[in-house]
Image: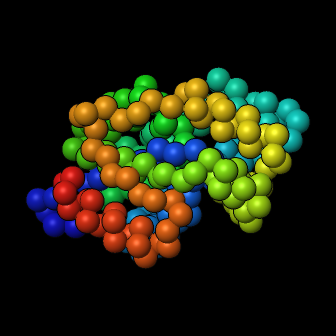
């Protein structure tokens, strides 16, 4: 990264199944950028999504601990001048974005929002049929609908002072990457 360029952190808006993690994984590989994934951290911290672990992992206190740790790591990475991909749906809310922005403000990093747009029915289908990995789980139809409804209720559209690019979650990664690099030039 050139000395004069500020680091940036890429954050995401979009529902479960929108393609956020797919794009984030591929973007991290293509750009050799650190990627923090909240789902992988949650699984590493709390274990399976079953029973008591799931209740603890998604509780108010569990979220506070998880995102406190993620924000700390984000700050440390950005403080070195490195770019970062912060892969979570949690930043769909303005308060959560403001919290991260406040945490990283002394790093000089720019926050870039990638809004992954995917039709709800396709997003639901993806969440039910996707391959399970260290950072995502396949969910049943009932759970997916609950999460999609929760997303709709908690979603805060970007404000005029936020740097946002729209990426179609249905197109191939190479096309998404072209949109990203073009959008990044316009936002930085």
Residue occupying the far left of the picture: 4
Q: Say whether residue 6 is left or right of residue 112.
A: left
Report the coloring of the rendering.
Answer: rainbow
Q: Residue at x 76, y 30 (%)?
A: 56
Q: Say whether residue 69 is left or right of residue 63.
A: left
Residue 25 locus on image (x, y percent):
53, 65
Q: Nearer the viewer, residue 133 or 70?
A: 133
Residue 124 locus on image (x, y percent):
70, 50
Q: Quadrant of residue 85?
A: bottom left
Q: Residue at x 62, y 47 (%)?
A: 120
User: How many numbered dots are placed on residues in this image?
Assistant: 0
Q: Nearer the viewer, residue 108 or 98?
A: 98
Residue 41 visible? The answer is no
Split into 4 quadrants, where in the image is the N terminus?
Answer: bottom left
- Above or below, comparing residue 128 to residue 67 in the picture: below
Q: Residue at x 54, y 37 (%)?
A: 90
Q: Say whether residue 148 is left or right of residue 180.
A: right
- Above or below, comparing residue 92 to residue 188 in the picture: above
Q: Residue at x 59, y 34 (%)?
A: 151
Residue 149 visible? The answer is yes
Residue 35 locus on image (x, y percent):
48, 59
Residue occupying the far right of the picture: 51
Residue 67 locus on image (x, y percent):
54, 36
Split into 4 quadrants, where in the image is the C terminus?
Answer: bottom left
């Amino acid at each position: 990264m050139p000395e004069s360029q500020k680091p940036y952190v890429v954050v995401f808006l979009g529902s479960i199944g929108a393609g956020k993690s797919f794009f984030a994984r591929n973007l991290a590989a293509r750009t050799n950028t650190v990627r923090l994934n909240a789902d992988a951290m949650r699984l590493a911290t709390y274990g399976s999504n079953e029973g008591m672990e799931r209740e603890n992992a998604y509780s108010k206190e569990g979220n506070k601990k998880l995102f406190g740790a993620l924000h700390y790591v984000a700050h440390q990475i950005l403080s070195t001048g490195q770019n970062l991909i912060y892969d979570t749906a949690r930043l769909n809310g303005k308060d959560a974005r403001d919290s991260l922005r406040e945490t990283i403000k002394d790093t000089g990093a720019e926050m870039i929002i990638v809004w992954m747009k995917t039709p709800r029915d396709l997003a639901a289908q993806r969440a039910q049929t996707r391959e399970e990995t260290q950072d995502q789980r396949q969910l049943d139809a009932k759970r997916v609908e609950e999460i999609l409804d929760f997303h709709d209720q908690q979603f805060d559209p970007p404000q005029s002072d936020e740097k946002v690019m729209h990426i179609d979650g249905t197109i191939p990664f190479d096309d998404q990457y072209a949109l990203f690099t073009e959008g990044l030039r316009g936002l930085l």
